[in-house]
């Protein structure tokens, strides 16, 4: 009796590949979101008269530790006005996002540097107070 060889069939299951591609897509979408939004931690003070503003302006941050950021780049206060002069775009408004525990003297120095940088308007960012 002659035994016939069994033919091995190869099947390609695409379901795990689709799962992996979907997870990669989700990973890159989430990391792109976090790259676009800087991770500067600032606890804004509350105000009842707070109103939303356009996000296309220049943003200056002051952290709790007293570190100053121009958009997402750390700068010294002495360099801030020069940085503002060289990077002014079509906007003349700066948004100051300062932690509520920062000393007033530091905030005044940053405001002075912003005014020396040639910006005409300054908005101090606050969080809207839910109690009315």
Image (tube, rainbow, N blue to C red):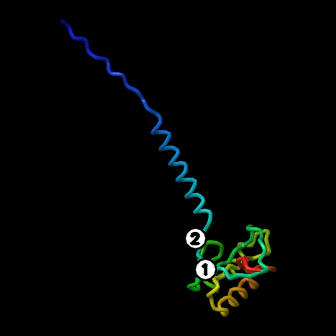
Q: Which residue is mark 1?
A: 75
Q: Find residue 38 and name its label.
A: none
For label 2, the SS is loop
Residue 74: quarter of image: bottom right
Q: Is residue 67 above or below residue 71?
A: below
Can you name the residue that lies furthest to the left here?
1
Residue 89 as seen in the image, left or right of residue 9: right
Q: In the image, residue 75 lies at what x, y percent?
A: 61, 79
Identity of the residue drawn at 31% across and 17% down? 7
Disc 2 and disc 1: Cα gap in Å? Answer: 16 Å
User: Which quarter of the figure is the C terminus placed in?
Assistant: bottom right
Q: Which residue is mark 2?
A: 39
Identity of the residue drawn at 69% across and 74% down? 59
Q: In the image, residue 39 lies at what x, y percent?
A: 58, 70
Marks 2 & 1, CB-CB < 8 Å contact:
no
Q: Label 2 crowding class (10 Å Cα cut-off): few <14, some 14-19, many 20+?
A: few
Can you name the residue that lies furthest to the front here?
132
For label 1, the SS is strand
User: Which quarter of the figure is the N terminus placed in?
Assistant: top left
Can you name the residue that lies furthest to the top here?
1
Residue 41 as seen in the image, left or right of residue 84: left
Can you name the residue that lies furthest to the bottom here?
105
Residue 92 as seen in the image, left or right of residue 113: right
């Amino acid at each position: 009796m002659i035994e016939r060889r069994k033919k091995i069939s190869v099947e390609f299951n695409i379901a795990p590949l689709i799962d992996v591609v979907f997870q990669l897509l989700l990973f890159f979408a989430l990391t792109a979101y976090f790259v676009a939004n800087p991770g500067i931690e600032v606890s804004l003070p509350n105000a009842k008269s707070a109103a939303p503003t356009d996000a296309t302006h220049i943003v200056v941050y002051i952290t709790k530790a007293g570190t100053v950021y121009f958009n997402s780049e750390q700068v010294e206060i002495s360099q801030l006005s020069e940085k503002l002069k060289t990077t002014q775009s079509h906007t003349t408004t700066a948004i100051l996002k300062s932690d509520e525990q920062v000393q007033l003297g530091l905030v005044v120095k940053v405001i002075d540097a912003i005014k020396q940088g040639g910006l005409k308007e300054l908005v101090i960012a606050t969080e809207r107070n839910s109690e009315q």
